[in-house]
Amino acid sequence: MIITRNWLNEWMDISDISTEKICDTLNSIGLEVDSLNKIRIPENVVVGYVEKCEKHPDADKLSVCQVNVGNETLQIVCGAKNVKAGQYVPVAKVGALLGDDFKIKKAKLRGVESHGMICSAEEIGLPKLNDGILELDDSIGELIAGKELSSYQDLNDDIIDIELTANRGDCLSVFGIARDLSVSLDKIVYYIENIEDEEGGLGIGRVLSLNVKEKNSSSLLYKVFSPLEVNFPLLLQLRLAFVDRKQDNVYDAYRAYATHSSGVIVKLYSCDKLMNPETKKCEIVLQKDESGVEYVEIAGKKSYIGMDEGDELKPSDDDSRIIFEESYIDPEVISRAGKYLKNKNDKVFYHSSRGSEPNLEFGSRYFKYLLSRFAKVKWYNGVETIGNEPERIVLNIHINKINALIGQNIDKTLIVKILKKLNFQVRVKEEFDLLSVDVPAYRHDISNQQDIVEEIVRMVGIDNIKSVPLQYIESNNQNEAYKKYKKKLHFRKKAASIGFFEVVNYIFTDSDRLKELSLPIVDEDKKLLNPVTNELDTLRSSLAVGLIETAQRNIKYGKKSIRLFEVGSVFDKDRNESLRLAFIFSGEVERPAIRNHGKPNTIDFFTFSQKISSIIGNFEIKKSDEPKTYLSPYEYGIIVKDGEEIGFIGRIHIDIEQKFDLFKTYFCEIDFGKLDLKEVKVESYSKYPSIERDFSFLVPKSMSYADIKETILAKRPKEIVDLYPIDIFQSEDLKDKVSLTIRFTLQSSQKTLNDEDVNSILSPILEALKERGIELR
């Protein structure tokens, strides 16, 4: 945001305050000054009046001018195309120093003497306004031939560039800066008085009608005027150039000047071009497109709210009637519409998406005042409006809470004074030592108590807050955030102890990469509006992409064994967030050593599963009918823990391995929310020895181990402390059956089991299996 000292002075009196003091104050209240540029007209540059302008007798592109500079008339040869008699121009007299080494001297050009130079804007230190000389007008003050230009205040200005944060849309105007600055400087901000319409004038209803098709979230104000004489004053041209908003069209200039000065979004439309020939009216309809973005339609042409109106709707010099529009729309609503914006440099969208001034009546008064200064227009009586008041936020905060957050006691009277000067409505409830604060509609960044405290600190001054040592008093209560932190720390330490290395990837990823791995993608209407880069254009739906790419980089660096894990957020199609724990293992199981003769084995499914089990505890792997596309369908399963599906495990598909130049690679992803961090409880153990018995069963090929285990567990006595399969044998002799060997571990807490006890314990189980068609081999 760029302002100038003279422009700021129109909103409040700063004549007694230096520019350096203003910059220091802006910095202290959180409006950081990025740069200060002082524009000063060189000495011996005066106002000149061109009395006569004739062609040079010996040069087609030169003119010989007689210029009145007060006490004398100078003959000056000028090469500018736009010089002519009757102009007031800046004249650098002989001896004037323009720049470091450009001194004006008497000269003879093609045989004609020249006693000075008629200057362009750039030559006297001003921004470039055109390709010729600078023509002066009385918008900068009364023009007196011979008067030093350095004495004209509006030509000598201090330009202040403020680096605003994105949340301070209320300061994207000179008025907004003045409003904030006035509190710290204890100044009064000037407000524009209303200029009444002429009596007996035509009503706006004769030329304009306003309709609403759907429920709207924006506010609009319309007026109509007839331009009688619209000047393009030098003051407007210069100030817009000072703030990097130079305009070539007079109406664009008035619109840009009003918006930059007041903060209200202003647009101008051609009434003549957009009028319905049948009704003789401009019919404006507010509606929404298929994406829910609001726009007004005039004569079949669209103008989106909070965006540039487009050249086809703008007025031209020959228009007899012009529509004046002001708009306000909630910055969150317009930000979502940014993805439909064709012109990414649209300054109207930049302003409205950060929060424009919602007081449209104030903006209307300012625009009428602006035209009354530099133009002659006739306003139509009345106004057409669509009102949608911004929702007001009311915050309740205790004085003790304010002082606790600041770390210093601030007098309640001072707190109330600061908030009221910032236009907050404050009600004091003495019995509760409570403040009820109404947030101004233009403060889009205020939403909680901490924001209120920040406003107080800004105005008190951070340098006036005493530094005190940080005191950390540990709470006895363990909240959910602490439990979540301890749980993450536990599993991270377990993973590191098993030999995995933690990585952290962006939550953003490449949508093309997600499509490549057939992973879900966030729905189009909820995708990122402003992606970091083209390669990070969406939110990740799995940790797989980041881990696969990290493994690929490590292999390129010459690593032979890649063991990585990550704990991070993923998002589904509706942008619902969940926390996941994922592992990837690629290449060799261990480093080359003597025991493996320098040729370690490559990771396999069972080794990888055992490592995951060492981290999250015992689990089962269940067959899946719908394996992940990027995983092998032959080495893939669902992880089941305590009867609940918590994730999946499997080998990266061989096509993906080849594409990413990976070794044999396995991947596992777990829903972190379904992992439990259980307290370790001490339990008694048996002092008697355990016994192992292996039984080989003939099992139908169609029957899964899960069915067999379920049958065993239904008859399982407490003496069977463990069971698991250890071998599968297939043969043509077995026909439609396979041989499955299951190991039973038995132990009693009362005595040492003998063969008779073991047979008695296992007999009911063998009978139950036999009923299912499972016999001993």
Image: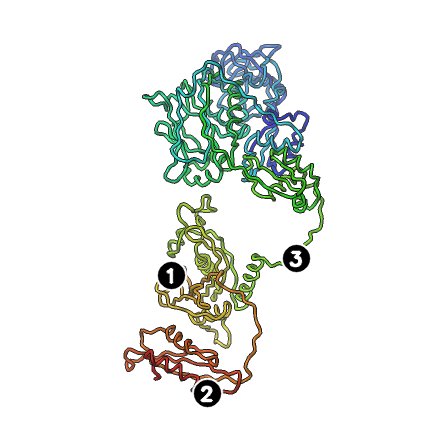
Residue placed under numbered mark 2 in the picture: 757
The image's mark for residue 639 is none
Q: Residue furthest front?
A: 431
- Neighbour tally class for label 3: few under 14, some 14-19, many 20 plus, Cα within 10 Å: few
Q: Is residue 514 visible?
A: yes
Q: Secondary structure at mark 1?
A: loop
Q: CA distance from mark 1 to mark 3?
A: 45 Å
Count how many numbered circles sit on residues in the image: 3
Amino acid type, callout 2: Asp
Q: Which one is earlier in the sequence, the residue at label 2 or at label 1?
A: 1
Q: Secondary structure at mark 3?
A: loop
Q: Secondary structure at mark 2?
A: helix
Residue placed under numbered mark 3 in the picture: 474
Q: Quadrant of the C terminus?
A: bottom left
Q: Nearer the viewer, mark 1 or mark 3?
A: 3
Q: Which one is earlier in the sequence, the residue at label 1 or at label 3?
A: 3
Q: Is residue 601 above or below residue 751?
A: above
**Residue 722 at x, y percent in the picture:** 46, 78
Q: CA distance from mark 2 to mark 1?
A: 47 Å
In-front residue for pair 229/104: 229
Q: Is residue 249 visible?
A: no
**Residue 337 at x, y percent in the picture:** 43, 39
The image's mark for residue 628 is 1
Q: Is 121 positioned to the left or the right of 555 in the image?
A: right
Q: Quadrant of residue 626?
A: bottom left
Q: Nearer the viewer, mark 3 or mark 2?
A: 2
Amino acid type, callout 1: Lys
Amino acid type, callout 3: Glu
